[in-house]
Image (cartoon, grey):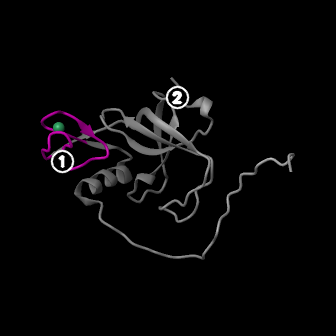
Amino acid sequence: MADEKPRKEFIKITSGDMAQPFEWSVGRHGSKFLAELRDNKRFLGIKCPKCGTVYATPRQVCRTCFVEMKEWVPLGNEGTIETFTILNFGFVDPDTGTERPVPYTCIFVKLDGADTSIGHFLDETDINKIKIGMRVQAVFEEKRKGSLLDVKHFTTVSE
Ligand SMILES: [Zn+2]
């Protein structure tokens, strides 16, 4: 018994397949943002008229000033990694209903011209090759449908 090493074991129980199709509106701002990604491979932000904060993804009202925002501004397809995590444990992807193969890297990226960041994926999983502040750029899907996943992932930009 003394020679036995503790084992880490992940038990999975499968209860069967379940289809639960549903759809929802992403709203006026979300629709404009996603249509621009789909049709022109371009990110848009929305700017607060009072404090000047540029939000991406867009929202209707500034979270600080509580004023309505209507000024759309084009953003770069490049940005800076704000934070990241490398996932080594599979979760069910709500977009596909299946587990995303591990490992994969989630990042928050502040696009050029924006003051907030968006969550997405990075195509690098070596922790020694990822740094906060690193420059990245969006890689778009060939066929786009009006989803944040029209961006396949971000990739690092060599400087
Ligand atoms: Zn504001």
In the figure, residue 76 lies in which quadrant?
top left
x then y, percent, for residue 136 = 47, 34
Q: Which numbered marker is on residue 48? A: none
Identify the residue under disc 2. Answer: 131
Q: Earlier in the sequence, mark 2 or mark 1?
A: 1
Looking at the picture, which amino acid does disc 2 mark? Lys
Q: Residue at x 87, y 46 (%)?
A: 3
The stretch of residues the image draws in magenta is 46-68
Q: Residue at x 64, y 69 (%)?
A: 13
Ligand 1: image quarter = top left
Instruction: Check the image and name the residue furthest to the top.
Output: 159
- Vertically, is 31 above or below 46? below
Looking at the picture, which amino acid does disc 1 mark? Val
Pick the residue in front: 120 or 157.
120
**Label 2 Cα crowd, 10 Å radius (few <14 / some 14-19 / many 20+):** few
Distance (Cα) linking label 2 and label 1: 32 Å
Identify the residue under disc 1. Answer: 61
Residue 56 colored in magenta in the image: yes
Instruction: Check the image and name the residue furthest to the front.
Output: 2
Q: Relative to residue 52, is residue 117 drawn left or right?
A: right
x then y, percent, for residue 85 = 52, 40
Element marked by disc 2: loop
Q: Relative to residue 128, is residue 141 drawn left or right?
A: left
x then y, percent, for residue 22 = 39, 72
Say if mark 2 contacts mark 1, CB within 8 Å: no
